[in-house]
Amino acid sequence: MRYVKWILILLIVAFVAAFFHYTLPGRDVARIVDTEVRRVDFGENSIFWAGADTGQTAGTVNRDVRFINAVRPNGRVMVYRNEDTGWGWPPYFKLDSSNLQTEAADLVSTQAEPQWVVITHYGWRNEFMSIFPNAVGVRRVDSPDVQLIPYLNIAILVFFFAFVFWLWRAWDRFKQRRIEPLVDGVSIAIDNADRRADSTRERFLAWIGTWRGKPRK
Amino acid sequence: MIAVLRLVFLVFLVQTVLFLLISGIQRWNARKRAWAEWEALEGSRIDWDTYLEREMREYGRSIRKKLIWSVYIVPMVIVILLVYFVNFA
């Protein structure tokens, strides 16, 4: 039973961590090599794609998606999709995918003359499911070694943990005030019943004893 | 357009539930505070109903009560700021 409890807690923690890792903004330093649009047919990975551009027909089976292809300073490649999140989840309220695509196209550079940029994004790249992080913003930087401190993520996580702590405290206090007195009452009742049973047994044994001529105490 | 309206409607619903909940709790707490103060009054106690009415009128004017409106205001400001910084800055 204890293992079941711990496995459940671990699963919940893993799920919450994955949720934040997917949803919170991350920033990559990269060099944009190409921007493109290609048609995507959504399948079992459709949950990892956003919707059509804000104001356009939603829920189509396939549509054209903008992509930004980039190379990281360590030489590894990264492909971002560039979709509106619109008014839905996650709450980035990104409505300017076309503008972002133009900015990205403007920042395309070659290996010989790199123009480094910081790409803000959320989501995961996963080759097995063909999913891509969604680029949210792009900004030019002079060198690839910029120090990026995720103040917003720190603030959001601090608020989240403070909220969880507060909930836990409230629940704990509720338990102490309302549930423990009940449990105490029940255990007192059980003790009483137990004691009564004991004395009944003693009296019964004493009565049996009288058959063999033992005097009752 | 539908998507915006749906968002506004859902957020409004959640905010209203929160608003009513917090209002109720705050009111209850104000009442409890008033009771504690009234009990601490020695000798020259006035009638509890009159005292409560006066205290609750004071609570109605307090900043504590007005701050509950931030349940509506803060998310709206955050959304407007997000829309601006993500798309136009």
Image (cartoon, grey):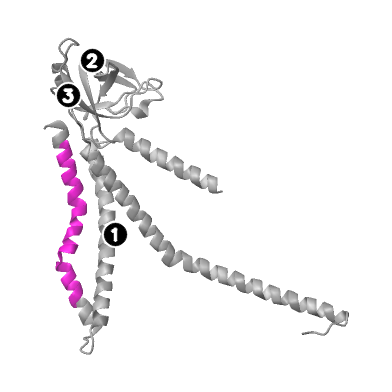
Residue A177 visible in the snapshot: yes
How many C-alpha atoms fall within 10 Å of the one at disc 3: few (<14), some, or many (≥20)?
A: many
Chain letter, disc 3 residue: A
- Asked whether the beta carbons under mark 1 and mark 2 sit within 8 Å of each other, the answer is no
Viewer-side residue, B12 vs B38: B38
Label 1 belongs to which residue? Answer: B21
**Relative to residue A114, is residue A177 depicted above or below?**
below
Kindly identify the amino acid type of the residue bearing the numbered disc 2.
Glu
- Write the residue at 17% across / 68% down: B60
Kindly identify the amino acid type of the residue bearing the numbered disc 1.
Leu
Chain letter, disc 1 residue: B
Q: Which mark is residue A52?
A: none
Range drawn in magenta: B54-83
Query: In the picture provided, is B24 more to the left or to the right than A211?
Result: left
The chief SS type of the magenta part is: helix
Alpha-carbon distance for marks 1 and 2? 50 Å
Chain letter, disc 2 residue: A
Query: In the picture provided, is A197 more to the left or to the right than B86?
Result: right
Q: Secondary structure at mark 1?
A: helix
Q: Which mark is residue A36?
A: 2
Alpha-carbon distance for marks 2 and 3? 12 Å
Q: Position of residue A186 (x, y in %)?
A: 55, 68
Are the residues under badges 2 and 3 in a single subunit? yes
Viewer-side residue, A135 vs B49: A135
Q: Is residue B76 magenta?
A: yes
Alpha-carbon distance for marks 3 and 1? 42 Å
- Write the residue at 56% across / 68% down: A187
Q: Which mark is residue A100?
A: 3
Q: How many marks?
A: 3
